[in-house]
């Protein structure tokens, strides 16, 4: 019972009801500098779970490079990705956190 509660609450590797994780978008960090500026770009997705036809809609606030440029970032050092998932991905929001100068 406790294991089921932990899995549903997001305490297991993948939460079924809710999870909120941050992972690196890139895996190459050899001598990666840390920028002085950050910028975030959000992408949202919602799925229809009933019919089984995989109907979904996704929308993004803007492209990563365009948002970084507007934030004054001309040299992107690295990008982190925060993923919020509700009801096992029925609703998912990804936030890309851009670091650079």
Image (cartoon, grey):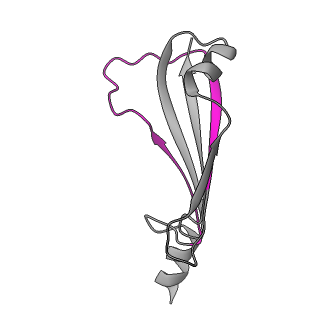
Task: Point out the stretch of residues depicted in magenta.
Answer: 17-45
Residue beneath the point at 49% across and 75% down: 52
47 lies above or below 50 = above
The image quarter in which residue 5 lies: bottom right
Across and down, in percent, residue 62 comes to: 65, 31
User: Which one is in front, 80 or 89?
Assistant: 89
The image quarter in which residue 51 lies: bottom right
The image quarter in which residue 84 lies: bottom right
User: Which one is in front, 93 or 24?
Assistant: 93
Q: Is residue 4 magenta?
A: no
Q: Is residue 30 magenta?
A: yes
Total marks drawn?
0
User: Which one is in front, 36 or 14?
Assistant: 14
Across and down, in percent, residue 83 comes to: 55, 50
5 lies above or below 25 = below
Q: Residue furthest bottom?
A: 1
Residue beneath the point at 56% across and 20% down: 65
Using residue 33 as the reference point, say whether residue 93 is left or right of it.
right
Across and down, in percent, residue 68 comes to: 61, 19
80 lies above or below 32 = below
Using residue 49 as the reference point, say whether residue 71 is left or right of it.
right
Q: Quadrant of the C terminus?
A: top right
Across and down, in percent, residue 75 comes to: 51, 11
90 lies above or below 72 = below
């Amino acid at each position: 019972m406790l294991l089921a509660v932990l899995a549903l609450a997001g305490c297991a590797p993948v939460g079924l009801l809710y999870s909120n994780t941050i992972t690196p978008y890139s895996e190459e960090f050899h001598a990666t500098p840390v920028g002085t500026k950050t910028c975030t770009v959000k992408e949202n997705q919602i799925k229809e779970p009933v019919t089984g036809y995989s109907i979904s809609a996704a929308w993004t606030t803007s492209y990563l490079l365009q948002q970084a440029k507007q934030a004054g970032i001309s040299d992107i050092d690295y990008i982190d990705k925060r993923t919020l998932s509700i009801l096992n991905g029925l609703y998912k929001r990804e936030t890309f956190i851009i670091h650079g100068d």
